[in-house]
Amino acid sequence: MLKKILLVLLVIFVVAQFFGPEKNQGDIQSVEPFLNETKPNAEVTAILKETCFDCHSSFTRYPWYDKITPVNYWLAEHVEDGKKHLDFSQWSTYEAKKKDHKLEELIEMVEEKEMPLPSYTWTHKEANLSDDQIEAVISWAKNVRSNIQL
């Protein structure tokens, strides 16, 4: 009986590999309006690319394990949720008040080390921000906020 159950589960797992969620495979150029408007320096730009854009833009660099169902559904849900909160690819469509609020949230989340998510840094060690990197991002975001015309 146990062998039959395991065989059925194996078949279901194998068949499931042929299905997956829609990928977030837009163009990395979609963040250019955001970068052009907010003008992060090279250090902050690199931090944003390594730690933010995968889940908060229209372009995600998928890891090898994204090809495994159900992991791919879990990743897709993270990206979808991230884009609901902040989508750098949609930055130019945000009103000034919304931009200010999103930067305020970014500052808070980075300052409190809630972003990037631990589940992201677990598999992306380069996304673990040092105190200096956190300060650089916060300083840049505060500067951008001070220049937003509300």
Image (cartoon, helix red, strand yellow):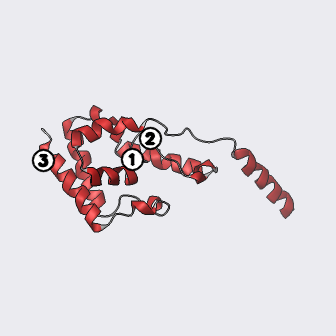
- In the picture of the structure, the residue carrying the numbered disc 3 is 146
Locate residue 50, reporting x and y percent. 39, 53
- In the picture of the structure, the residue carrying the numbered disc 2 is 59
Locate residue 148, reporting x and y percent. 15, 41
Q: Is residue 33 above or below residue 102?
A: above
Q: Is residue 130 above or below residue 9?
A: below
The residue under the point 25% across, 56% down is 137
Gap in angstroms between the C-alphas marked 1 and 2: 7 Å
Locate residue 70, reporting x and y percent. 62, 51
Identify the mark nearer the N-term, 3 or 2: 2
Tags 1 and 2 touching, CB below 8 Å: yes
- Count up the numbered dots: 3
Locate residue 83, reporting x and y percent. 40, 43
Tags 3 and 2 touching, CB below 8 Å: no
Gap in angstroms between the C-alphas marked 3 and 2: 28 Å
Between 81 and 113, which is closer to the camera in this rendering? 113
Q: Which mark is residue 53?
A: 1
Identify the mark nearer the N-term, 3 or 1: 1
The residue under the point 84% across, 63% down is 2
Rendered-image quadrant of the N terminus: bottom right
Amino acid at pointer 2: Phe
